[in-house]
Amino acid sequence: MAEGSSVSDSEGLEKRLESLLSRYSSDESGADSELFCADFCKVVEEYASHWHVPLPQLRILEIALRHFSRASAFFPTSCEHVHRTISSIALSVFELLLFFDQKDFNEEPLKQFTATFQECHSVLAKHENVFLLQVERLLQDGGLWTSPALQAIVSASSLPQNEVDGYISSELPVFLDLRVRYLSSCGRGGEAAALAKCCVRHPTAGQLLFFLQVYLSWLLKTAQHDRLYKEVADINGKDALHIICSLECEETDELLLALSTAFLSQQLQRGDMYYLCELVLVWTNLHRRLNTSKQTLLDACHQLMLSATNVKSIFPFIRAILQEVGEDGVQFCVELCANALRSRLPCDVLTKTFIYKTIAVLLPSDLEVCRACALLIFFLERTVESYKMVYLLYMHPDQEYHVDDSPIGNNVRFETLQVLKKDLYFDPEFWNLIALRTSCLQLMSEKVVSAALEEIMEDKWISKYCTRGSALRSVCQREAAGKKRRRKEDRFCKRDSNTASKRFKVDTEKMRLNNHALRRRGNQGSQALRESSGPLRRSFWQLDRIHGSLTLRFDEHRRTTRFSERNLPKRKIKKPKWLLEDSGTLENVPLKIKRNGLKQQKLLRSCVMKRSQTVSDQEQCQTQTASKHSSEGKGEQRLPKRVLLGLCETSSNHP
C-alpha cells in the first residue's frame, strides 16, 4: 500500500511539474525564471513533506531533477535563481544518500537513481554548480561512505595528519556539517565527535562553530573536563555565546550551565572583557532555570572570581547578583569591590573611580563609607563637582553606626574601611569645614581653583545643589533605617516590659522604706526611664546643637564631630563660703549679687549671724563659770565689770 501511494504521488508530481513547465517554457526572461523557480520549489516541498523515510523522498527528488534539467534549457546560465535551485536539490540529495551504505548503491533503487542523476548532471554542468559536482563525484566513487580516510577518522584510528587534512579539504564544509548531523541523529555521538574534532583542527572547516559545539558537548557528556578547559581556552566571548544559544534547543540546562561556566572561567583567566556581560547574564539565567539557591549562586560567583585577572570583571557580576539575589547580595558585592582594591592587579584611574562609586551606591546609608569614597574620588579627579560632594557629605552631622541597620556585617565594613582609608591623602575625621576646604583647594590645580574660587568660597551653590535631591538621598535612607531600628527596639521593649516593671517595683519599694524624699526621686526616675524607651543618643549637648542648627542656612551650618564633644566648656568652681568664714576674710568680700543670686547672699548672712551668736554665748558661759569658781576659791578676785564688757565686745566682733 505504501508503494501504491508512492506511485500515485509520483504521478501527481509529474503532472504538476509538466503543467508548470509548459506555462513558463515560452518566456526566457529572468523574471519568469524567478517565478518558475519559486513555484517549482513549492511543489517539490509539498510532495516531499508527505514522507518521512528517505527512499520515497529520493524518488520525488529524482523526478524533480529530471524536469528541472529540461526547464533549464530555456533559462540563461548566469541566472541566480536557477543556480540556487540546483544547489537546493543537490544538498537534499546528499542528505538523503547519507542513509544508505555502500552495498545499497549496487541494488536497483539506488542504481537507477545514480544513472538518472548522471544524465541530469551532464545537462546542468553548464551552470557549474559545486554542490552538484560534489554529489556526482561521490556517486562515481560508489557511495558517500566509501572513502578510507573517512572510515579511519570516524573509527578514531591512527591516520597521518596530512591525510586527514587532505580528506577534509576535499569535501565542502556544508557536506561535513551534514555528515556530523547525521551521525549525531543516529546515536553515533562518538563518531560525530571524532569527525567534528578533525574539522575543528582544519583551518577552513574550523571556521564553522557547529563542529566545535558538537565536540565540546561530547567532552562534557564523557566528563573529559581537563580536555574541555583546554579546548575553550582560546574561544572568545562572542563565539561562546553563539555556541550556548545554538545548543539551547538540543541539550539540557545542566550541560549548558557547565559549558558556560567553562567559558567564563577561561575568559576571566585571560582578562578578556569581550561579550563578558552577556555571558554572565546567560550564566545567571541558567542558574535561575535550575532553581539554584542564593547561597549556591554566590559561592559559584566567588569560585569564578578567584581566577579573574582583570579588575573590570567585577562589574558584570555585581549587576547580575543584584538582579538575581537582591539585598542579600550587597555584602558579596562590597567584598568584590574591596578585594579588587586590595589586589595587585593593574587598575587605571577611571576603574578605581567606578569602584568607589559602586561602594557608595551599595552603602548609601553609611555616612563614613560615603565620605571615604567621596574623598578618594576627589583625590583622583580633582574637580569642582567631586569637591562639592565631599563638602556636602562632611556638612551632615556624624551618624552613629548600627549593625542592625546595615546590609553588611561589621567585619566586612571594618575591612572595607581599612582598604579605603589606606589610599587617603588625609583623613579629616576631626577637622572643621574650613580646614577641609583649605586642604582640598590645595590639591586642586590653579586653573580649576581660579575658575570656580568665587563660587566655592561663597557657598552659594549649596542650596541649589541640594535641591537636586541626590546629595540628601543618603540622609533620607538613614532616617528610614533609623525608623526601622526604632521599631525593632520598640518590639524588644514590649517583649521585656514585664521583667523590667517587676525589677523596677522592687527598687521603688526599697527606696520607699528609706526616705520619703528618696521615694519621690524614685518615682521621677521611673517616669524618666519609661520616657527614654526610644533609641539611645550620643549626647544631649550634640542633639541641642544639631536641633538648633536646623534653622540656620547651609552657609552658617557648623559641623558637629566627636572631637567637639570632648572640648565641652569647663564649669567655674567657686570657693566655699565657709573657707572665707574660717579665714576671717569675709568682711573683705563685697556684698554683691553674682551668679548664685540673692538667695545665696541672704543664706550666707544668716549663717554668719548664727555662728557669731553661738560663739558669744559660749564665751559668756565660760566667763560665768570662771567667775563662779573664782568667787568660791580663796584669794581669788573677781574681774572688773569693765573687763567683762570688753570680752563681750571682742567675742561679738569675732567672725
Image: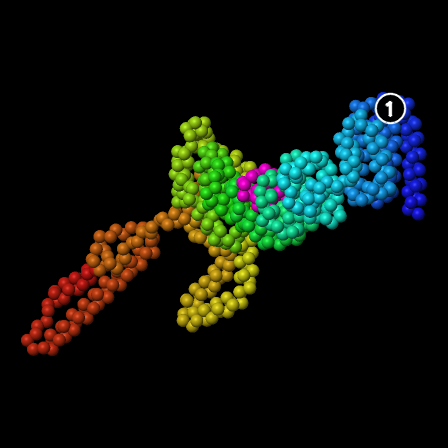
- Left or right relative to 510: residue 167: right
Q: Position of residue 51 (x, y in %)?
A: 86, 43
| Front residue of this view, candidates 425 and 187 | 187
Q: Is residue 64 left or right of residue 202?
A: right
Q: What is the image's colouring? A: rainbow
**Bounds of the magenta span?**
262-281
146 with respect to 286 (left or right): right
- Tag 1: residue type? Phe
Image coords of residue 235 (percent x, y): 60, 40
Quadrant of the rendered structure where residue 139 is?
A: top right
Give the residue at mark 1: 74
Residue at position x 81%, y 37% from top?
93
Query: Which secondary structure type mostly characterizes the magenta part of the structure?
Result: helix
The percent coordinates of residue 618 (x first, y second) are 20, 68
Q: Quadrant of the C terminus?
A: bottom left
Hey, which quadrant is residue 7 in on the image?
Answer: top right
Residue 71 image point, x, y percent:
87, 27
Please name whichever residue, 284 or 608, is drawn nearer the observer in this view of the structure: 284
Check if residue 263 falls in the magenta segment. yes
Residue at image point 45% right, 34% down: 382
